[in-house]
Image (tube, rainbow, N blue to C red):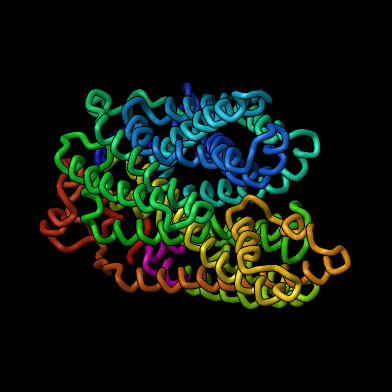
Amino acid sequence: MSINNLTRPGDAGYASASQGALIRGKRRSMPLILLGLIVAVSMSSIDQTIVSLSYSAIQSGLGLDSAGVAWIVNSYLLAAAAFFPLAGRLSDAIGYKRMMLLGIVAFGAGSLLCGLGPQSGIALTWMIASRVIQGIGLACMFPSAVGIIFTYSPVEKRAKSMALFFAITGAMTSVGPIAGSYLITFSWRYVFFINVPLAVAALLLTAWLTPGDDVLVDNRTKSHLDWPGAILAALAMIALIVPLQQGASVGWTDLRIIGSLIISVGLIITFVAVELRSTHPIMNVNVFRNLRFSLSALASLIASVVFIPVMFFLSVYGQLSLNLSVANASLLILYFFIGFMIAAQLGAKRFGRRGIRSVFIVSGILTIIGFSGIASAVTAVQSGVPVRAGSLNVMIGLAGAGVGYMFSPAATDMVNRAINASYGEVTALSQLLKNFGGALGMAVLSAVSSSMFADKLFSGLHGYGVSRSDAQNIANSVGSGSGSHSSSQLSSLPEQIQTQIMNIVRASYATAAGRVFTVMACAGVLFIIIALLYPRESNVEDVPENVEDLVINGGSLQDAADTGNATDTGNIMSTQHGRG
């Protein structure tokens, strides 16, 4: 279903939404529709961290080695990334509500199967297959949720609805560590079982509150699914993300890692070539010809390079350098999301009034101040106690505000700019960029952290008999996520020097974390550069009468501009996000 097909007055898209969506003869407000969507997608947000931080409990519960558990964690992301392009197109083909319900059922079923995993020889295969089902469920839900929001949100409230959706579902990520630390005291299985009642609630809420989508289904898409494109996209994502996930533990010079990266580049080039020739592509890559779309997509990618890794590094810093429990360390993540949620609403309002350029500038400033402040505060650690704890918490909140301020507006701007593309495929593309950004960020920042951590460890511990290879092994263990604490790595050393050594370890990781957060601050600089590159748009009061017809009938933005005075793209798209 093309975005353009929803702009004609009287259709079941933008125009009808301003009066409220009709459901079985009753009107439902957008907040009620959002409720079901948020509950559904929040399951996946919680799952991202609750499983990763319950790593050890799952490993011991199933009797697996660290490599096996790593695949249980990573198979979820891989399945989602591989299925996103097809899921985005299918959501246009069979309808957003149907696809949303299908995704909820898949995610809930996958969670139930994970919790029922057998403690036998097939445990690893069972768990990976169940996690793949969960990943497919996520891929079904996200494009559908965004499609529902854009279809049924009133024009003047669309940015606010998107901001609320992203802020709450993103903030649910911080619930994972807290919930996980509590649930694993009973059993690792409850880490997965917790999703089952959430899935049931989401299924009921979405079925009742979300309008039917029969009138919105694009039957042309339904009969022309681009299977070659879908397969190429899936293979390209797997070939790209796997080496990024495994490089830190296997070694970046390993031929398998290098070979996989080379193959992924070839697959991506082939995918683009196939899609450009396809009559009904799985993903309209021509959208990148729009400079504004490409810049907002780049901003989303950069934000994701920071967004996923920051949770990992804050958690490890809290546990290792500050010697906090998992639950207390997760409070650091919570401060990040408090700033994220508040700024998301403010960013949406500014986006509605002034456009995306000013959003990127404000976001860049906040990001630079926040992450630079964290970098300064985390290194001030003495005997496991932060010297400026209050300053650290404030700076974490500011960093979250910097990312949150632009996260939703950038995604909204991408959809607004994607002429002749559907909500499903643009959202799938956005999520692919975010998955790739998260994997890239973890790979690069883990390498930065591991190198600095190993150097500081060797410098501080070589007098205790720790070799450079021992220091690198400890750093790799922490950096790969296979262990948050290093005390087990040092258990062979005399007990009387354990305290002294652990203080050195904590200070060493604090220094490494400071370097990581300094690199993250560079994202703010890039946001400002993107804002400066983002083309200004003419500030005109009236839209030529024939602009809408041009857009509805497939005309380009340039065609529309040529009919009269240049006009704001957002007005052409019937979206009220202001001028750049």
Decide: is 425 above or below 404: above
Q: Residue at x 36, y 73 (%)?
A: 529
Please identify the residue farthest to the right as the structure is shown. 496
- Residue 233 in which image quadrant: top left
Answer whether residue 378 is magenta in the image: no
Q: Which residues are magenta?
A: 345-362
Q: Residue at x 39, y 61 (%)?
A: 299
Residue 412 coordinates in the image, percent (x, y): 39, 52
Decide: is 69 above or below 573: above
Q: Is residue 88 left or right of residue 376?
A: left
Decide: is 446 above or below 53: below
Q: Residue at x 48, y 68 (%)?
A: 363
Q: Is residue 286 among the parts visible in the rendering?
A: yes
Q: Is residue 348 among the parts visible in the rendering?
A: no
- Tell me the chief SS of the magenta region: helix
Q: In which quadrant of the rendered image does the N terminus lie?
A: top left
Q: Is residue 33 left or right of residue 542?
A: right
Residue 7 coordinates in the image, percent (x, y): 28, 41
Q: Residue at x 34, y 30 (%)?
A: 90
- Residue 107 in which image quadrant: top right
Residue 67 coordinates in the image, percent (x, y): 58, 42
Q: In which quadrant of the rendered image does the C terminus lie?
A: bottom left
In this orientation, which residue lies closer to the viewer: 245 or 361? Answer: 245
- Residue 44 in which image quadrant: top right
